[in-house]
């Protein structure tokens, strides 16, 4: 996911989250982003949605967006994969509608079997 798409997605998540930019979130980066060298030292970063744009530039993550980002209340989840063609977001109907209606992001609805 490029930076513009990441920032737009964070903006939509912020608009749809009840606490807005203050929404407590967790971020996880897959060890595969580092050549699958360190599966013994996994960690999850914490912060708020207001902090999320800088996750794209985290020095230890070599310019990758997080593999997973979700709020503490678990109302939605974002799943990216550096070698797949898409990012998946699961969440409430209002979030799905906002993503599908957005003019800057390309979004499609997946069936539950996908």
Image (spheres, rainbow, N blue to C red):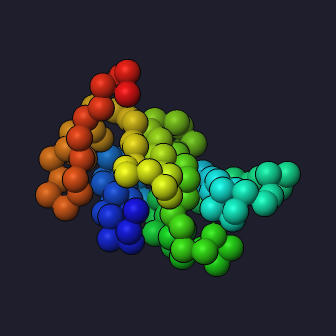
Number of numbered markers: 0
| Image point (30%, 41%), residue name | 95
Q: Which residue shows up at 14% across the image and 58% down it?
A: 103
**Of the pair 74 and 30, the residue shown nearer to us:** 30
In screen coordinates, is 54 left or right of 59?
Answer: left
Q: Quadrant of the N terminus?
A: bottom left
- What x and y, as percent, mark residue 20? 39, 54
**Placement of the C terminus among the 4 image quadrants:** top left
Q: Which residue is at the front of the view, 67 or 97?
A: 67
- Image coordinates of residue 61 in percent, x first then y, are 63, 70
Is residue 48 visible in the rendered structure shown here?
no
Q: Is residue 85 left or right of residue 103?
A: right
Q: Is residue 77 visible?
A: yes
Tell me which corner region of the image, top left, top right, bottom left or bottom right, holds residue 59.
bottom right
Image x and y of residue 92, in percent: 34, 32
**Image location of residue 97, percent across then percent down:** 21, 39
Nearest to the observer: residue 66 or residue 84: 84
Q: Residue lying farthest top?
A: 113
54 with respect to 15 (left or right): right
Residue at the spot 37% in from the left edge and 21% down from the top edge: 113
Give the residue drawn at x 44%, y 39%: 76
Nearest the camera: 23 or 1? 1
| Direction from residue 80 to residue 42 in the image, left or right | right
Q: Is residue 68 above or below residue 112?
A: below
Task: Spot the residue most to the right.
Answer: 40
Q: Where on the picture, by quarter, is residue 66?
A: bottom right
């Amino acid at each position: 996911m490029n930076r513009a798409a990441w920032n737009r997605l964070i903006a939509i998540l912020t608009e749809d989250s009840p606490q807005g930019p203050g929404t407590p979130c967790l971020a996880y980066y897959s060890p595969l982003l580092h050549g699958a060298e360190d599966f013994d030292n996994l960690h999850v970063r914490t912060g708020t949605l207001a902090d999320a744009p800088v996750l794209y530039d985290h020095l230890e993550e070599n310019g990758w967006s997080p593999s997973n980002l979700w709020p503490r209340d678990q109302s939605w989840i974002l799943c990216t994969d550096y070698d797949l063609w898409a990012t998946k977001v699961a969440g409430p109907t209002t979030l799905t509608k906002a993503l599908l209606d957005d003019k800057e992001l390309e979004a499609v609805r997946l069936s539950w079997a996908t």
